[in-house]
Each structure stands twice: as structure tokens, then as C-alpha cells.
Image (cartoon, rainbow, N blue to C red):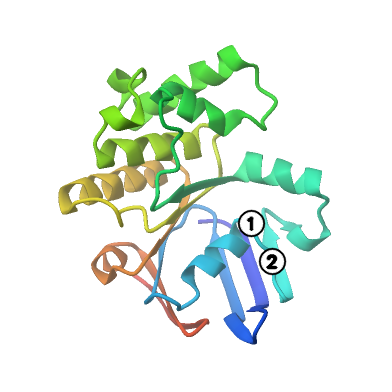
Amino acid sequence: MSGGLVTLERVTKSYAGGVTALDDVSLTIGRGELAAIVGPSGSGKSTLLNLAGTLDGPSSGTVTVAGKDVARLSDRDLSRLRAAELGFVFQQFHLAPGVSAVDNVADGLLYADVARPERRHRAAEALERVGLGHRTGHRPHEMSGGERQRVAIARAIVGGPSLLLADEPTGNLDSASGAAVMDLLRDLHSGGTTVVVITHDRDIAAALPRRIVMRDGKVVDDAVG
């Protein structure tokens, strides 16, 4: 691990009606980490992911990603930052129905200024990397839940992001498929990707090297080892 990839400094996120989703949170995710952000529903986990992933901005405080203060970036520069540094995996797979796996993955490069043939080539390589090289032409309805999540992971990594943010990636899977997805995330981490898993499952969190525990919008524990 070397240097901070994502840093939140005294970040608060509030919404209309006086709801505070994050309350004065300071946190750094270093390059090369494999970490879990764990807590019950409503603890602020997904809000933290949205801020770390530049999908939302703080009400106060500073969010820095890859050395850049997100609030100071133009929309174009923010899009470039996401394309270069960030990959997202969600509990819902968000795959286009009726579209082949390779084209679903290639869509992850739509904003990366890559020609379609090269997008499909890289998508096929990403599917091979997640163990689905034999399923490139299959559509989501022809795949199991675990396979669909692997397609979603391939789409998230096709651009070679520094940071993979996974929000409840095993939430819609049976235990065997969920374990396989976690093994895949560990493999990606071993290959150099920084991986942050947002989960309510304490068993999943306990198996990762760093566990950041949230409750009521605050970080209440941050343990390594």
C-alpha cells in the first residue's frame, strides 16, 4: 500500500428534511488496499460509496480522489477521472437485457474514447479474466446470478480502474455464488486493483484485511488485520 487513493476530510452529507447520512467522516483508502465498509441499513455505507466514487458531492468537507479535489473538477474532468480511476459493482447487476455479455461489458468503455471493435476486444479479455471467456455471446437471461455478477464485474474492470467499489456485490446471490464473487474480488486485488466492498454481512467483512464499521453516519471502528 502506498499513498491515499481516496481521502475524505471531515465530510458531512445532509439531505432535505434534516437527514444527515454522513456526519463529520474522515477516512483514507490507500492504493492497494482490500477493505470492507460494514454496517446496518441506514448507517451511511452507500452514501460513503457515492462520495468516494464521485457520484455525489459532500455538503461540507473535502473528497479527494487520485490526488484531485473532486469539488474543483469540471463535469468533463470528473467524467475523465471516473473513466480512468473508478469501477462500480452493485447488488443489482444493471445489465442490458437481450444484449450479449461482451457488449454489456464493452459498454463500460463508452466514455473512454475507444472505437467499438477495440471495446469488444477488451470486453472479451475482461470476461476471460473473470472466468467467462466461454460465455461472451450469452445474454443475461441465459446466465445464473453469479455469472451475471461476474459480467458486471468485468464491465467495471474493463477500463483498468485503480479502484473498484462494490456495493453489496453478494446481496442477490446464494452462498456458493457469493463466495465465488468474493474470491474473484480477492484475485483482482492481488492483481493490483484497490477493492472496497460495502456490505452488511459481518462474515464477509471479517474475512477482509481492513474493516471500517459505520453506524448512524459515523465511522465507529477501523480495524486492520
Residue 207 point in image, percent of width and height: 26, 63
Residue 154 point in image, percent of width and height: 43, 34
Residue 101 point in image, percent of width and height: 40, 26
Is residue 151 positioned above or below 121 on the image?
Answer: below
Which mark's residue is nearer the viewer, 2 or 1?
Answer: 1
Mark toward the start of the polypeptide (2 vs 1): 1
Taking the image as shown, residue 148 lies to the left or right of residue 59, namely left
Badge 2 is on which residue?
63
Taking the image as shown, residue 130 lies to the left or right of residue 109, namely left
Q: Quadrant of the C terminus?
A: bottom left
- For the point 48% across and 23% down, which residue is it? 103
Residues at marks 2 and 1 touching, judged by CB atoms closer than 8 Å: no
- For the point 55% across and 33% down, which residue is it? 108
Is residue 121 positioned above or below 164 on the image?
Answer: above
- For the point 27% across and 63% down, which residue is it? 204
Badge 1 is on which residue?
55
Please identify the quarter of the rendering in which residue 137 is found: top left
Residue 17 point in image, percent of width and height: 65, 84
Q: Secondary structure at mark 1?
A: loop
- For the point 60% across and 16% down, which residue is it? 116
Label 1 sits on what residue type? Leu
